[in-house]
Amino acid sequence: MILLSAGALVTSTSSGLSVPDWPSTYGENLFFFPIKKWVGGIFFEHGHRLIASFIGFLTIILSILIWKFEHRIWLKKLGFIALFLVIIQGIFGGITVLFYLPQFVSTVHATLAQTFFCVVVGITFFLSKNFNDKKNIEITNENKFKLKRISSLTTIFIFIQLIFGALLRHSKTFSQINFQNIFLYPHIFIASVVLFFVIKNFLTCRKLQDFKTYYYSKMILILVLVQIALGILTLIFRLETNNSLNWEWNVIIVTVVHLLLGALILATSLIQLLHTLHFHFNFFGKEIFFPANK
């Protein structure tokens, strides 16, 4: 979440090109760049790079520890997938700078960040007592199918919404966002779709006797309602600034919180989905298992 915050601050303050070279910082080693030169947008961009490097280092340690001490082969592979994603994420971050913030590359960079976040959340869940409890949800097969379907659709559309949010955030006119911005309307439309599935998910879970599933669905609904309010507030603030390119900290803070809340909603929905799929699910006629001991 700290790395996502740093990335959001870079975008919200238009600091992406404050450090024009990569992987060095103004020709100097990234880790030895003088603090006295951390001024203006350099503070946000250089800070983002340092935090990203630290997260990459932690991911290396995580993948090694999982490989050494975890007996589940599929979880070992997931650890290395997390490592692969964080490496690719860093490369795309560099390409974003070297090619002057192209929208497609910047959007892929942001999407990879959310994907990496999901993988880490999944690893955390698989290592938790909640997963290793081996207790299935005590509901009928018919209701279990409905729950898996609505949980899957909710998570998928939340992820799609984050991609559209990244497209809007990295559009050339983001700093001058208004109702003429072509990326605003798909973002609003997908938000309404997400709200529909979140409400349906909550109503479905409320009928069941599984407390955890109901708790997750209620949290998702509350977070999404707050998220919609933050989205409206972000739009109002940006319109009120009269398309100013100067930093407006009320706009920046609300925008950053809006992004972080989106990531939190995705994580919560993913945890509910994994809890629902615990321990197996059907994928195009094939049984996929989450074995705790294999």
Image (cartoon, helix red, strand yellow):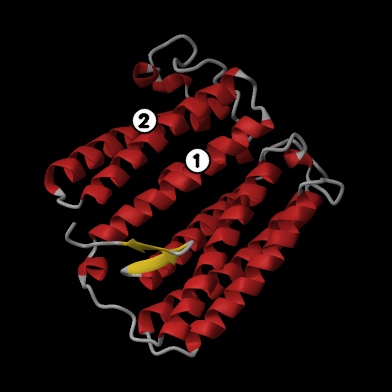
Picture layout, residue 157 above or below residue 259? below
Q: Residue at x 50, y 55 (%)?
A: 263
> What's the mark number on residue 112?
1
Residue 61 screen position, x and y as percent: 22, 37
Mark 1 residue element: helix
In this rendering, position of residue 34 left or right of residue 161: left
In this rendering, position of residue 151 left or right of residue 12: left
Q: Earlier in the sequence, mark 2 or mark 1?
A: 2
> What's the mark number on residue 235?
none
Residue 1 visible at all: no
In this rendering, position of residue 62 left or right of residue 228: left
Picture layout, residue 226 above or below residue 202? above
Which mark is in front, 2 or 1? 1
Q: Which residue is mark 2?
A: 53
Q: Residue at x 73, y 39 (%)?
A: 175
Mark 2 residue element: helix
Label 1 crowd bin: few (<14), some (14–19), many (20+), radius 10 Å: some
Residue 4 screen position, x and y as percent: 48, 45
Q: Residue furthest front?
A: 285
Label 2 crowd bin: few (<14), some (14–19), many (20+), radius 10 Å: some
Residue 128: quarter of image:
bottom left
Residue 98 visible at all: yes
Residue 289 screen position, x and y as percent: 31, 62
Q: Residue at x 38, y 49 (%)?
A: 119
Look at label 1 and name its amino acid.
Leu
In this rendering, position of residue 267 left or right of residue 170: left
Q: Residue at x 82, y 46 (%)?
A: 182
Look at label 2 and name its amino acid.
Ser
Q: Residue furthest top?
A: 27
Picture layout, residue 53 above or below residue 23? below
Residue at mark 2 to residue at mark 1: CA–CA distance: 15 Å
